[in-house]
Amino acid sequence: MSTKDLYNNVVVTASDIPAVRTATLTGAAIDTAGYQSTLVCFDIGNSGDTLSGSLKWTLTVEESDASGSGYTAVAADDLHNGYASYVIDAPAEDSLVVKFGYKGNKRYLRGVATATGSHSTGTPIGIFAVKGHPLIVPVAAQA
């Protein structure tokens, strides 16, 4: 295998498909079994609302030993970026992808985009994961 081969060495998994959101979004569980590294990514589009200190989105990652319960916020020490949340509270701060690199030891992760204020028009938000350093390579082909 080529050393420049991401195709056979990572899996991209949708946790929640991109859609316009006006309320808090909690993504589906991301199972990290079989992978030694995971990025949880938030795909943020252009907000239809004027974001501000009182009308904002706060992005966080939660972890658990079980897929359906027991989720708690990931501590900053268990994230490569060094911060436990990312706040989008100004029009110039949307239209980006925010990534959290997980280095903790829980099996399940999920992204949470928390809405503060009354979002009337909404913001396009999706959540996906990039799982890497697989224990078995190559990883299964994706459709």
Image (cartoon, helix red, strand yellow):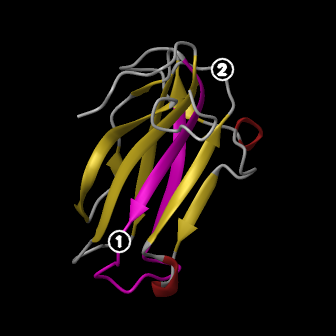
User: Is residue 1 highlighted in magenta?
Assistant: no
User: Is residue 45 highlighted in magenta?
Assistant: yes
Q: Is residue 26 above or below residue 34?
A: below
Q: Residues within 10 Å of mark 2 (few under 14, many from 20)?
A: few
Residue at point 59%, 61% (across, down): 86
Q: Quadrant of residue 80?
A: top right
Q: Main secondary structure of the magenta part?
A: strand
Q: Is 75 on the left-hand or right-hand side of 137?
A: right
SS at circle 2: loop
Q: CA distance from mark 1 to mark 2?
A: 31 Å
Q: Quadrant of residue 129?
A: top left
Q: Is 21 on the left-hand or right-hand side of 52?
A: left
Badge 1 is on which residue? 45
Residue at point 23%, 76% (across, down): 120
Identity, as a three-letter code, of the amino acid under mark 2 = Asn
Range covered by the magenta-colored residues? 35-62
Nearest the eye: 117 or 85: 85
- Spot occupied by residue 140 in the image (x, y as percentages of width and height): 36, 21
Badge 2 is on which residue? 105
Q: Is residue 113 above or below residue 94?
A: above
Identity, as a three-letter code, of the amino acid under mark 1 = Gly
- Spot occupied by residue 42 in the image (x, y as percentages of width and height): 44, 55
Residue at point 39%, 19% (across, down): 67
> If the image is split into quadrants, where does the N terminus sit?
top right
Q: Quadrant of residue 119?
A: bottom left
> How many labels sit on residues?
2
Q: Is 21 on the left-hand or right-hand side of 103?
A: left
Nearest the eye: 55 or 1: 1
Mark 1 or mark 2: name the one nearer the start of the chain. Answer: 1
Q: Residues within 10 Å of mark 1 (few under 14, many from 20)?
A: some
> If the image is split into quadrants, where does the C terminus sit?
top left
